């Protein structure tokens, strides 16, 4: 139906964005872009919304010979609340799924995410699937015959491929993934007036989890319509140093990194060879454009990453950056959906209504790790969350770890099937209320103190709740303090892939 994306949006973005290969790629004219309504409609009378399924062609990637996914197509469900309260703001939730999957269901997690957000805020919300298009077959795959790759296996191949063709960064899978998110905003903005009279959607919240969390960062960096960003379980900024720090924690790499290890990508970490790739895949490289309000959401038990990834980049971004660390959840956020959605809902409502959010700051003391937490608005409640590793072998708070030769599951873990053989590890975060210490020029002062354990490591954070707009509740946290402030392993100098 619509063949060209908004030239006005493209030109306005050009005035503020810092030029980069990714920006150039996303904002280049591509006549392949189009969308059409499929006629499939979902209704949720309980929450009060209607979803219209569009088919979107976001563009062509590389050449027809490069892979079997030359032309990228997507399902895009545009959720319109029964009671529209705002006609300029909209949200985009970026998710996965494979090409050829069936129509979305009204009670699926992705659909409900947007449905709740739309109904609560009175704004349009779009769910974008097939980011990336998958599965993908690459004829030049080092595995022959070429394997069918999806998710991390596909991303890993394009990292590997770029390192052999560094003059073509568009080989990196994040490029067409980011372009697709931007084109989805075009499609939402063009379709919305057919269901919401007078709608002129030009201000977007963008959110997505895991690899889509990366795309959230990148979309915010290259599309000026993004006025708020909420990356979920993806805080691996300062990426090279951050991956190296995982090795110092684990004495290896997470079993969830297997696809990257299969292509020996970790061998480039201690050398300068990883830097050309990092230039294109590290959100810190785009920090000049990441000045909008940001809510960075992660989980305490993420099997991919470590609790303190943000220690390697926090404070390096301009503009407002809020933290929400969800306790007792792993990478899927299956057990953290409620705080995730309610926290994001209050954040988005405040953006739409231009309601000030509480100002928050904290310090973590050397050695003791004591957190001094300050806010300019008195919270309804403040909680200290805390947990401890099961032994002194690894600085490892993951709820799920690998069942590997280097790290067998028993006796501590419960065997489960996640990314192959894995272990469910009972690292539980507890909570206790903490009271006001006092009030000074920094604001209301709260303090979290924990004793250093005799064996292993203890993690703790401060979690606060404040009144938000329209009866919502702001929920923000500090970073996690880990004591003792040591890591059990040295830097890897060869970085062979030991999976744990």
Image (cartoon, rainbow, N blue to C red):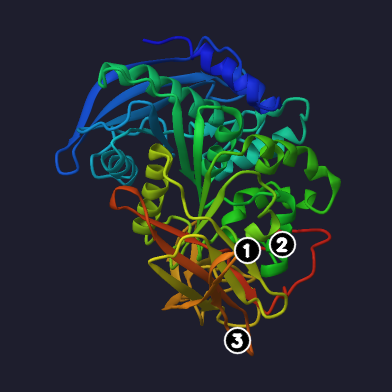
Along the line of sight, which residue is nearer the eye, 152 or 228? 228
**Badge 3, how many Cα within 10 Å: few under 14, some, many 20+?**
few
Q: Which residue reaches farthest front?
A: 441
Local crowd size for mark 2, using a 10 Å CA cut-off: few (<14), some (14–19), many (≥20): many
Q: Quadrant of residue 108?
A: top left
Whether residue 270 is visible here, answered yes or no, is yes
Q: CA distance from mark 1 to mark 2?
A: 9 Å
Nearer to me, 44 or 372: 372
Q: Which residue is mark 2?
A: 245
Task: Determine the residue positioned at 38% across, 58% down.
Answer: 339
Asked whether, in this view, residue 249 is left or right of residue 330, the answer is right
- Distance from disc 2 to disc 3, alpha carbons, whole Å, reads 24 Å
The mark lying in front, picked from 1 and 2, is 1
Q: Residue under label 1, please give it.
A: 308
Identify the image quadrant of the C terminus: bottom right
Instruction: Name which of mark 1 and mark 2 comes first in the sequence.
Output: 2
Residue at left 65%, top 32%?
Answer: 172
Looking at the picture, tell me which residue is in the foreground, 158 or 314: 314
Can you tell which mark lies on residue 451? Answer: 3
């Amino acid at each position: 139906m619509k063949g060209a994306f908004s030239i006005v949006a493209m030109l306005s973005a050009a005035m503020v964005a810092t030029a980069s290969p990714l920006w150039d790629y996303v904002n280049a004219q591509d006549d392949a872009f189009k969308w059409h309504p499929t006629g499939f409609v979902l209704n949720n009378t309980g929450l009060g919304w209607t979803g219209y399924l569009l088919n979107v062609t976001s563009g062509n990637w590389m050449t027809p010979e490069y892979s079997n996914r030359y032309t990228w197509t997507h399902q895009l469900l545009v959720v319109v609340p029964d009671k529209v309260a705002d006609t300029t703001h909209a949200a985009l939730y970026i998710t996965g799924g494979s090409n050829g999957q069936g129509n979305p269901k009204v009670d699926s997690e992705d659909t409900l995410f947007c449905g709740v957000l739309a109904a609560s805020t009175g704004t349009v919300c779009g769910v974008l699937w097939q980011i990336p298009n998958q599965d993908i077959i690459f004829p030049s795959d080092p595995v022959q015959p070429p394997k069918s790759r999806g998710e991390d296996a596909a991303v890993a191949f394009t990292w590997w491929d770029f390192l052999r063709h560094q003059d073509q960064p568009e080989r990196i899978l994040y490029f067409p993934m980011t372009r697709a998110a931007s084109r989805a905003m075009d499609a939402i903005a063009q379709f919305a007036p057919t269901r919401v009279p007078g709608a002129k959607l030009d201000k977007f919240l963008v959110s997505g989890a895991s690899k889509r969390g990366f795309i959230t960062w990148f979309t915010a960096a290259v599309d000026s319509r993004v006025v708020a960003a909420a990356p979920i379980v993806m805080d691996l900024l300062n990426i090279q140093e951050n991956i190296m720090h995982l090795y110092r924690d684990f004495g290896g790499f997470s079993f969830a990194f297997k696809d990257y290890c299969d292509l020996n990508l970790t061998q480039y970490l201690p050398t300068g060879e990883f830097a050309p790739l990092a230039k294109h895949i590290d959100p810190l490289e785009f920090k000049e454009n990441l000045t909008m309000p940001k809510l960075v959401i992660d989980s305490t038990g993420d099997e991919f990453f470590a609790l303190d990834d943000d220690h390697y980049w926090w404070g390096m971004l301009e503009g407002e950056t809020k933290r929400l660390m969800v306790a007792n959840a792993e990478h899927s956020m299956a057990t953290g959906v409620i705080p995730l959605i309610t926290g994001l809902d209050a954040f988005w409502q405040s953006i739409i209504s231009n309601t000030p959010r509480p100002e928050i700051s904290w310090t973590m003391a050397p050695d003791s790790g004591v957190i001094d937490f300050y806010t300019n608005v008195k919270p309804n409640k403040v909680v200290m969350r805390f947990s401890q590793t099961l032994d002194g072998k690894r600085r490892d708070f993951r709820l799920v770890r690998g069942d590997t030769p280097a790290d067998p599951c028993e006796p501590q873990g419960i065997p489960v099937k996640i990314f192959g053989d894995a272990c469910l590890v009972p690292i539980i975060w507890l909570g206790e209320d903490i009271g006001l210490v006092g009030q000074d020029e920094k604001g209301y002062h709260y303090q979290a103190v924990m004793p250093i354990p005799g064996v292993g490591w203890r993690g703790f954070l401060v979690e606060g709740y404040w009144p938000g707009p329209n009866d919502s509740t702001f929920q923000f946290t500090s970073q996690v303090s880990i004591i003792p402030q040591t890591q059990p392993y040295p830097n890897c100098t060869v970085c062979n892939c030991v999976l744990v």
